[in-house]
Each structure stands twice: as structure tokens, then as C-alpha cells.
Amino acid sequence: MKHKNHLTTNSYFINRFGELSTSYLFYQMQDIAWEHAAILGFGYDKLKVDQQFWVLSRLLVKITRRPKWGEDFTLETWSRGADRFYGYRDFYFVDKDRNNIIQATTSWLVLDLKTKRIVELTNFENFPTYEESVFGANAKKVRAPKSEDIGQFSPALFTDIDINQHFNSGRYLERIINSYDFEFHKKNELAEFEINFLKEGMPSDQLAVKKQFIDDKNHICSVVRESDGIDLIRARLVWESR
């Protein structure tokens, strides 16, 4: 039931510290999830026939260490089955010594392309189940940041838009990471993040990042749409000293 990809940390995967970047960590998880869903018979092309599509709703990632430039590692994923609406999928990043260096759990929804209503996964025949759980729990609800600290609004760019004509999930994460300056990243590294994807961003949107600092290491962020002030995503970040 597990699906594995053997990967190398290529030069275009790394951050300025020579380690797997947060955004490419996310994109690799996204890629293997799509790939495994297709193998299981619930992939993009299959759902498209029924005018449906997968969306990522919640995500929790904990990082022990990041693969370094040129390091080989294995990315493992599996379905944990579904309740009425959510489909659950977990991940391990495993190094050559079989250490689980990054762990993650995700919660997914299927939407109807026309109505944008959630499709009940109990309607899917032979939806996979698997009992192993990385954290023994699902990603949780992230509360809205209590703050007036909102960055500058800027437009969605061409490369931000995905095949569903929405703002790509990983680009939200990049906006949050890029809202911290070089000096902050020089002193701190992201050890854990939990994200709720709430609304669809569109090509015409102007977006900004809002932050609340619980303390030096624990932050709550959101990506806000200018036209209506709605949070499109919310994120809980845990930083550690580099």
C-alpha cells in the first residue's frame, strides 16, 4: 500500500544553506501524492472525467533535518483511508540510514468542478485504507492571527496559477517564507508547520501576509486577499535556532 520514490536533492531543490527548501519539500509531497492517487485509480485524470478534482485542505510537517545538496533519500507515502469527506495521506522522508528525517500528514477533499461542493468519499468504491499513522492524529484547525501586521499587497503572478486556474498551494507557502527577511532566516530555520487551505486564490487577486508572533519561535500567519479581507490560508510555524 506504500508508494516510494528514490530522490536526490538536486541543486534547484535547495535553499541558500544548501538544504532541501521548504517549498520543494512541499512540491515533492504534492507530486508523489498525485502519482500514488493515479496508481490507486483516484488520480487527476480519473476524477476529471466526473468533473471532480482533489484539493489539499490541511497539512502538518515536522522536520528533524533536511536532506543536503546531492544527498539521496526516499519519499514514502500511503493513504490512511477516509471519513465522510476527508481523505488522509501520510509521508516519510527517509535517509540512507533509514532514519525518518521529515514526517507529514495531510487531509484532502474532492470538489465538484461546477458546484465547488465537497464530494463524499464514501461514494468512492474500493477507496484504500491503511492503519499506520505518522503522528497518531490528523492536522488540526489553525486559528486566525490576531494582528494588524499585514505586509504589502501584491498581485498573483502567472507562475502562481495551477492547472485548476487557482493560486498554487505551494506558492502560498513561498509567500509566507519570503515575508521573513534574510537576517531572520540566517538565525532561524523552520522545524514544523501546520497549514489550513481555506479559500481558492484567483489570478486577479492581490495578496498579503499577516503575522502574529506568539513568542520568538511560534508564529501564526495567514495569506489575506485585499478585495474582501478573507484569509485564503492560515499557517502555524515553529522556528528553531539555526
Image (cartoon, rainbow, N blue to C red):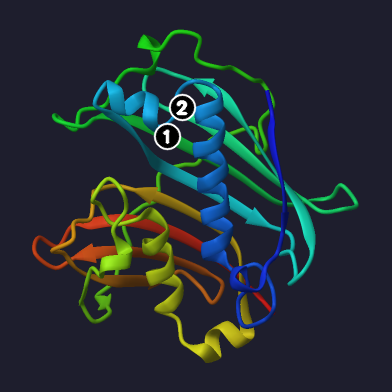
Viewer-nearest residue: 7 or 124: 7
First in sequence: mark 2 or mark 1?
Answer: 2
* Lateral position of residue 49 relative to residue 175, left or right: left
- The image position of residue 159, as x and y in percent, is 32, 66
Q: Residue at x 69, y 78 (%)?
A: 18
Total numbered labels: 2
Task: Kindly indicate the quadrant of the structure image that contains residue 46.
Answer: top left
Disc 2, SS: strand
The image shows residue 28, relative to residue 48, as above or below, that is below
Q: Quadrant of the N terminus?
A: top right
| Direction right: furthest residue | 97
Does 122 sit above or below residue 182?
A: above
Residue 3 pos. (x, y %): 67, 33
Q: Secondary structure at mark 1?
A: strand
Tell me which residue sits at (31%, 48%) in the image.
Answer: 163
Q: Which residue is mark 1?
A: 108
Horizontal side of residue 32 vs 241, given as left or right: left
C-alpha distance separating marks 2 and 1: 5 Å
- Give the residue type at disc 1: Trp
Q: Residues within 10 Å of mark 2 (few under 14, many from 20)?
A: many
What residue is shown with label 2? 87
Assess disc 1: are there few (<14), some (14-19) or many (≥20) residues with their C-alpha within 10 Å of its C-alpha: some
Q: Are marks 2 and 1 in contact (CB under 8 Å)?
A: yes
Q: Quick one: which residue is furthest to the bottom in this view?
A: 183
Amino acid type, label 2: Gly
Q: Which mark is residue 217?
A: none
Q: Position of residue 221 (x, y in %)?
A: 38, 65
Q: Position of residue 40 (x, y in %)?
A: 54, 22
Quadrant placement of the C terminus: bottom right
